[in-house]
Image (tube, rainbow, N blue to C red):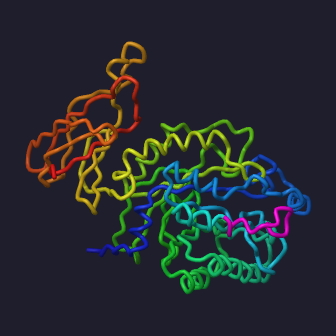
Amino acid sequence: MKSTPEPLPQHLAFESMAYGLFVHWGLYSQLGKGEWVKKWHQIPMEDYRKLVETFTAEDFDARELTRFAKRAGFRYLCHTTRHHDGFSLYDTRGLNTYDAPHSPAGRDLIAELVEACREEDIVPFFYHTTLDWSWDTENCSDEAFAEYIDYLVASVGILCTQYGEIGGFWFDGNWSRKDADWQEDRLYEMIRSHQPNTIIVNNSSIGALGAVGHPDLDVVTFEQGRPEPLDRSGLPKYVVPEMCQTMNLHWGIGANDFHYKSPAEVITDLTSCRKVGANYLLNIGPEAQGGIPAYEKACLERVGEWIEDVEAAVYESKPCGAQAEGQDFVLRNPNTGRYYYVAHNLPIPQNNHVTGAMGASEGPRMFRGITAPLRRAHWLDSGEELKLEREGDDIWTLHATGYPYGTNRVVRIAELSDGE
C-alpha cells in the first residue's frame, strides 16, 4: 500500500485560510480589455510600453483594498507583482526601469500592499509570471532564455528578501514553453533559503487541472475548474488543492465583460471547494489606476456577510468521510470536534405561491459515516434548534427546516455536536 504524506504546519495553516482574494492589476488595466490585451490585440511591445507613461496608480489604496478583503471574508490576498507583460509593481532595484517606481506612480506598490495586509491580518501572497513578453520568452533562443532565468530568479529574490515574511508565491507561465529548462530546482531552493515556510504554487493551467507538478510545490491548481477529491497516496509530499476563478471571464478588468458571478454563485463555489478540502482563490480586476470595481466590491462584501455567520464551518473544517445525499455534505472541525451539515436546496415555504419551491424541500436529510455521540443540531445563522435522530451505528437523520420568510442563505449550515 502506498503511503500518504503528512501535512506540514504551513499546509494546515494554508488550508484553514480557505478563501483568498486574487488581484490582477497592471498596465493592461488602462485598456480595460483583459490582461492578455497585448497578445490578442497584437500590440507591438514598443507601443505597449508607452502605457507606463500614463500609469499613475492614483486610485490604488492598499488599506482600502485590504479592508475590503477583510469585510468580504478573505483570509489571504494574492496580488500580481509582475504579469506576462513584464511590468513590475515592485521596485526591481536596478534590474530594469520597467516598474512602478519608474512610472508616474513613483511608488513601490507591493511594499504598500504588504504593509496594509499586516495591518488588517491578511496573509500576503505574491503572483509572479514566469512567461514574459518583454523578453519574448516563448520564442527567444535557448541562450537568451537562460539569461532570462537568471533575471527571473533575481527578480523573485527581491520579493523574498525585501518584504518580510510572505505567505506564498504563485507562479504562472511555465506552460508557455513546455520543453524548456525552467530551472525550478534553482528557483524553489532560493525561495526556501529565504522563506522556508512559504507556500509555493506553479499554475498547471486550464489544460491540466489538478496536475501534480514539481515535488517542491505545495499546491495543485484548478484554474476555472471545480476541484475533485485529491488522492495523495504515493505523492512525495502533501499538497493542497486550490481552485482559482474570475468574477467574470477576464482576470484583468474587462470593461465590456458583463458576465459576472452573483453572490449565490460565489457562495456555492466556495462551499463546493470546502466539500473536497480545497481553497478558493477568487479574482477581481481593479480599474485603470487601481480602484476597486463597484460590482465586485458589493457582491463580495455580501458574501462576507454570509461567511460571518458560518466561519467555524468555512475556514477550519475539513472533509470527514461522512456521506450525505444530493449536493449536501458534512465537514468536521478538527480543533473543536464539531461537525457541520451543509444543506442545499431549502425552500421558503411561505413564498411558494410567488416563486414556487423550485426543487427545494425541507424535512429529513439522511447522512452516514459518523459514530460520534451527536446530541444537538442547530442552524448557525439563526440558532434554531433542529431535530437530529440516530438511525444506526453511523446513520443519522437531520430534520432540516426551510428558510423563514424574507430569508434565503443559498447554502445553509447546521452545527452538529455532543451538546456540550
Q: Position of residue 393 (x, y in %)?
A: 8, 50
Image quadrant of residue 60? bottom right
Does residue 35 lie above or below 197 as drawn? above
Depth order, front residue of 401/181:
401
Residue 166 point in image, percent of width and height: 56, 73
Residue 81 magenta-drawn? Answer: no
The answer to whether residue 75 is above or below residue 394 is below
- Residue 238 image offset from top left, x and y in percent: 40, 72
Q: Quadrant of residue 80?
A: bottom right
Instruction: Identify the residue shown where x is 41% and y is 63%.
Output: 15
- In reply to whether residue 110 is colored magenta, the answer given is yes
Quarter of image, res 4: bottom left
Residue 285 in the image: state x and y as whole percent. Answer: 67, 50
Residue at 29% x, 52% y: name it: 331
- Taking the view exactly as shown, the residue that stands out farthest to the top is 353
Asked if residue 220 shows in the view, the reply is yes
Tell me how many marks there are: 0
Over which residues does the magenta segment extend?
A: 100-112
